[in-house]
Every structure is written in structure tokens, then in C-alpha cells.
Amino acid sequence: MIELVFATNNENKIKEINALLTNSIKLLSLKDIGCYEDIPETADTIEGNAILKAKYVYEKYGYNCFADDTGLEIKSLNGEPGVYSARYAGEEKNADKNMDKVLQKLTHYSDRTAHFKTVVALVINSKITTFEGIIEGKITKEKHGKDGFGYDPIFKPNGYKITFAEMPLSEKNNISHRGRAVKKLIHFLNSKK
């Protein structure tokens, strides 16, 4: 069995990833390894932040590790919020305020095209490998649904009439940006056995 740390304190992300993992991978959280500090996210790209977080855990705690970083990129806002998605409306990382800011900024735009992009960075024995997942969609005019987290209530994936926040977790995982990146990660890990 492969033991991997997932470098996040976000319980929602842990739940999503655990639902995708096979029995051959044992997932440890940052709490499990006694890591309670805020891991720096100072890179100017989504990929850079994922690599920073994974390397931090590997170098400081000695565990093989993967980390993800995700951004919502909106065409009419020139790719905003992008790498600043979690703290778009301020350092307190409030999802409702972030969504409100996006909706307010898009008020006068008819093009609401957007995509979610996740990059997963894996560090095993100091070797870094990255995996990317993207899902295209549109930003709704108001929030819909109670499930999910982050921008899920305002993101409607192409080909669907509902937002991520209105979908069961299994359906979201099947098509989501994070699901796509993690499936590539799992395929890579299984090919190494």
C-alpha cells in the first residue's frame, strides 16, 4: 500500500479525494502528520503553488506527498480570480464574499465563460510530477445549491443544467477539474506498482 500525505486542511477536498482513491493508497492529512502551520502559497501560478505545498511537506516532514491548487479563471475578467481564487475578496478566504465579488464584477458582461483548473503536484522520493484537470463552464447569475464548496454554487459545467453545488459528490467527482487531475495521479501511481 502506498502512503501519501495530501497537503491540505480542507476537509471537503479530503472527502472528495478519498472518494476517488483505490484501496492501494492510504491518504494521510496534514493533521495526521502533526502539520498545523499555514503552508506558504506565494507562487504566481496555480502549478507553482501546488509544487510549493508538496515540496514543503516532503522537505519538512519527510513524507511522500501531493498537493493541489485550484483556480477559477473567468474569460471576461481576463482570467481572474485565477491563482487568487481562495482569497479573491480578502485574506479571510470567505467563499460567499468571493462569489459575491465575481457576480458583482460580471454584472455588465454577457460572456460568462469560465473554467476551473486544478494542478496536482506529487513528490515521491524528491521527484516532482504534476497533473492538470480542467472543466469548462459558465458562471451563473446567482448562487444555486448547498453542496460543494468554494465557487461551486455559481459554476455550471458545460452540458449540465445545474451547478456543482447542486450535484451529488459522485457526479461532481466524475467530471470535475480536481477529479480529472486526481484520476491522472491515481493512474500514474498504479502504473508504478
Image (cartoon, rainbow, N blue to C red):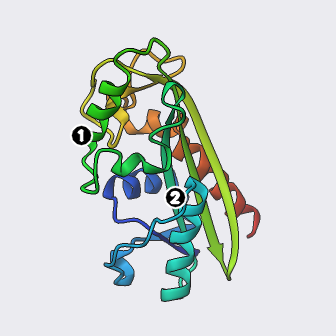
Q: Residue furthest top?
A: 110
Image quadrant containing the C terminus: bottom right
Depicted 143 relative to depicted 181: above or below:
above
Residue named by callout 1 = 97
Mark sitting earlier along the chain (1/2): 2
Residue 68, numbered label: 2
Q: Residue 76: x and y, percent?
A: 50, 24
Q: Residue 15: x and y, percent?
A: 37, 54
Q: Indicate the amino acid at tag 1.
A: Lys
Depicted 171 relative to depicted 126: above or below:
above
Considering the numbered disc 2 on the image, is that residue within a helix, a strand or a loop? strand
Image quadrant containing the N terminus: bottom right
Measuring 70% from the left and 65% from the top, which residue is drawn there? Answer: 129
Q: Is residue 168 left or right of residue 178?
A: left
Measuring 38% from the left and 74% from the top, which residue is drawn there? Answer: 30
Mark 1: few, some, or many residues within 10 Å (few <14, many ≥20)? Answer: some
Which is in the foreground here, disc 1 or disc 2? 1
Q: How many numbered badges does the structure rendering display?
A: 2
Mark 1 vs 2: CB contact within 8 A? no
Depicted 47 relative to depicted 32: above or below:
above
Q: Is residue 169 left or right of residue 185?
A: left
| Residue 151 position by quadrant | top left
Q: Residue 173: x and y, percent?
A: 48, 40
Depicted 48 relative to depicted 133: above or below:
below
Considering the numbered disc 1 on the image, is that residue within a helix, a strand or a loop? helix
Q: Indicate the amino acid at tag 2.
A: Asp
